[in-house]
Amino acid sequence: MNVSFISAADIARHVRQGELSPVQVVEEFIERIDCRDSDLNAFAEVAADRALDRATRIEDAIEQGSPVGPLAGVPVALKESAASKAGFSRTMGIEPFRESVSETDSTFVERLEAAGAIVIGTTNTPELDHKGITDNPLRGPTRNPFDLTRNAGGSSGGSAAAVADGLVPIAHGKDAGGSLRIPAAWSGVYALKPTFRRVPETTRPDAFADELGIRSSHGPITRTVRDAALFLDVVAGSHPRDPASLPDMDTSFSRATTRSIEGMRIAYTPDYGTFPVRDDVEQTVADAAQTLECAGAVVEEVSISTGYSHDELTEIWLDLVGANLAALNEWLTEHDDIDLIGDHRDQVSDGLVDLIESGKGTSATEYLHANVVRTAVHDTLVDLFDEYDLLVSPTVCHPSVKNVSDGETLGPERVNGELVDPRIGWCPTYLLNFTGHPAASLPAGTVADGLPVGMQIAGPRFGEGDIIAASAAFERLEPWSDWYPPR
């Protein structure tokens, strides 16, 4: 049995029933990584020996009749910059941290392993996750499985490419502006950004880092909706050391995959009222939105206005990111003697330096005043969700771009002739990070050159169940499983 494109749920079921050896599963995925990753550059580190050792222990537990969990024997990849696994490298995509190693496990990693998952490695990202592209001077770009000359998207691009090419069935990502959904859209896979703090974050020294500004969320990248729901079932839940973590759910997300969406009211926006969108992307998503009507939902195009222009919204996101990066750089300078815009300036990209330097000029009052814009976006979405259950749109406004060779690949500078900021200005995804609302990206189709296009499905706070139900309904009518392997 070739396991490369079997779902995580099916792998776990076969392992629990003794029909698949977890050692065999890991060996086959390691073999595929060895064969394919030289082309993709998806992985930052592959821990074959550690994965095989853990697989052996799971196999022994099964033979002894011990419980092994809902992800038993499933290889999982972790986004290197956003996940801590003791003994694994944690370079965050920057040269000065080439030798950095994690000393502890993230809470969600502990939960994954308690459910039987096997961490097989970590994946490539841009430096400090500062843009919607995966490329950095340390490791270079992660290539798109559908076209190796193009980028996989970011910042969880290594995770998305690994899943799309069958190197793992599930990969972790973290999303502060679209970092799960952007690479999912470009790489033809499914990603789910849960409600802010559905998955707890217990990092220190600052447990309140995401309370103001940009609300980031850990989540899954998978090839099936069911696998994403299973991941969330395992890692979601309150934690006493996360002051913002949400209470435990009284139902499973996996059950939502079989729910009907008959009568569900779904709004459709091509552009959030202000984003330029390439014509073929817009048409692909508009057609995909109609599939939800075939599943029984009522889909209506809506007009959205936050009161701010596309440029104003993008500038606020960049201001918040820059200020956070500047604060991080000050911490690194004080505690690790690493100043990314000082002594190490020649080891990082110009784009990261620009963001840190711009962030240094953002005052505390300017930072807090951005909350007025965030509130306007929040109120716009709340008003819409008073009338509709979900909101669908293009995930991003443009298909994947060509990679460059200097570690500084960026997104498009123009969309439909309009100038956009190449770091994030083509990604309406970040609006949902202003607010913390849940959202997913699913494969909606392809444009003429065969590149994938993603459709974003957003919901009200705590609305993951409806998002999963709608995603699964679409998947049943328009399955994307035959997209893989992409080459």
Image (cartoon, rainbow, N blue to C red):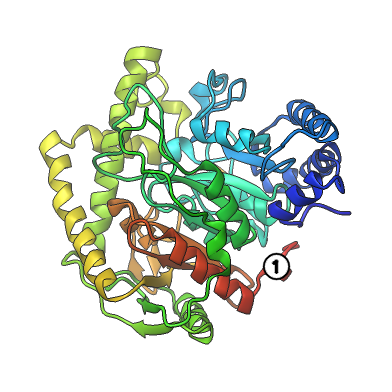
Residue 344: x, y in percent? 42, 22
Query: In front: 60, or 446?
Result: 60
Front residue (pair 331, 287): 287
Mark 1 is surrounded, within 10 Å at the Cα level, by few (under 14), some (14 to 19) or many (20 or more) other residues, namely: some
Secondary structure of the residue carrying tag 1 is helix
Instruction: Using the rendered image of the protein, determine whether residue 467 is visible from the camera's viewpoint.
Output: yes
Look at the image and tell me in which quarter the N terminus lies: bottom right
The image quadrant where one finds the C terminus is bottom right
Q: Position of residue 325 (x, y in %)?
A: 33, 33
Residue plotted at (53% across, 68% down): 471
Q: Is residue 403 left or right of residue 181?
A: right
Residue at 46%, 50% in the rendered image: 179
Q: Does residue 275 appear left or right of residue 46 in this picture?
A: left
Please tell me whether residue 278 is drawn above or below residue 221 in the rendered image.
Answer: below
Residue name at image x 63 percent, y 52 percent: 161
In x, y percent, where is residue 140?
Answer: 59, 40
- Label 1 is placed on what type of residue? Ser
Looking at the picture, does residue 1 appear above or below residue 482? above
Q: Across the whole image, how many numbered discs are drawn on residues?
A: 1
Can see residue 402? no
Q: Indicate left or right for 434 with 480 as reference.
A: left
Q: Where residue 327 appears, x then y in whole percent?
A: 28, 28
Q: Quadrant of residue 139?
A: top right
Q: Which residue is mark 1?
A: 481
Nearer to us in this view, 352 or 102: 102
